Amino acid sequence: MDILEILLSASFWTAAIRIASPLIFATLGELICERAGVLNLGIEGIMVAGAFAGWMAVYSGTGLWMGVAVAMAVGMLFGLVHSLLTVPFGLSQHVVGLGVTLLATSLTYYAYRLALPEVTSPPKIDAFQPYEIPLLSDLPLIGPALFSQTPLTYLAFILVGVVAFVLYRTPLGLALRAAGENPSAVAAQGLSVTGIRMGAVIVGSGFMAVGGAFLTMSAFDSFFFEMVNGRGWICIALVVFGAWRPGKALLGAILFAAFDALQIRIQQTPLGADIPYQVFLMMPYFLSILALIVMSRRAEVPAALMVPFNKGER
């Protein structure tokens, strides 16, 4: 009964949507990269760099939206590094991705210590505040969950629709999907596979960084290094769970976030007093793995994912 009450409470779904928001940004970014044929394992480090860059920009005196723009620019810069090494040079996408994660994380740590050498606790900023949409926020259950969030959450949901429209309703989206399925056909049409793939990685990395910035500028009001906490790796799994489709990936992000919000609340019930808390921390990841196994069996992987393309070669 305690679990049922939790699931039927507006506060639970409000928290689930808030937890899902950074996952939505980063999952969309990874989905764009993989649709074009590039696996971006730099996502974890890019999210850390975006979280720091956006927070530091606001702490230095810029506006919140300018902080989001700075975070996205930093993410795109790391995306440029990743795409240069993996697309035209054809280096291992696994190795380069892990290298970008290490590079971004290390540079972030260095920049933090350089900018705030004597700070023992992270300074706070004035973060985004929830904005209630009139009338819609008064709806039972879904009102507070969907229409009483911060502007970045609304932006995340809007981007799902935008990415889906671009992928399936525009020539650009067709070319991007073809670059991940049959790059030779793209080249035969006179289009640059290299340019399409690099552009996808750069834009996708920018989305990942905004996902990191959400943590410091919307979910919290300060920066600490453990805040990303493996969310980047979860987003890679969510792309597979969503079968490389934005709508399904959105549902996967909300599902994982619901598991995460649920384990926090179960710990506060009588059931939580009898079970070690580590079991509840493990629960969202365990349930996500089960869901991933079920969904991935029917997923169609882009045919040219992680396959380097050299014009003129078969």
Image: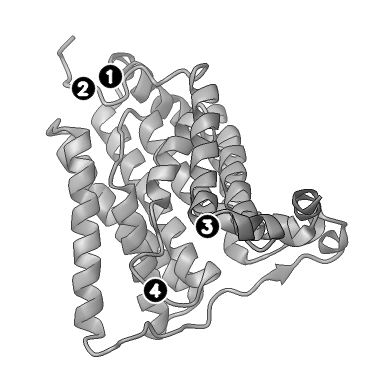
Say which label, 2 or 4, has the lower sequence index: 4
Name the disc covering residue 309, or none. Answer: 2
What percent of the width, then of the height, locates residue 261? 62, 55
* Residue depth check, mark 2 versus mark 1: number of the one nearer the observer: 2
Determine contact: label 2, label 1, CB under 8 Å.
yes
| Residue type marked 4 | Phe
Between 95 and 272, the residue placed more toward the observer is: 272
Quarter of image, res 189: top left
Which is in the foreground here, disc 4 or disc 3?
3
Residue projecting furthest to the front: 274
Secondary element at image label 1: helix
**Number of the label disc, if any, that sits on residue 277:** 3
Q: Position of residue 70 (x, y in %)?
A: 37, 67
Given this view, does label 4 or label 1 mark the residue nearer the observer? 4
Q: Residue at x 16, y 21 (%)?
A: 310
Q: Quadrant of residue 254?
A: top right
Amino acid carrying mark 3 in the image: Tyr
Image quadrant holding the C terminus, namely: top left
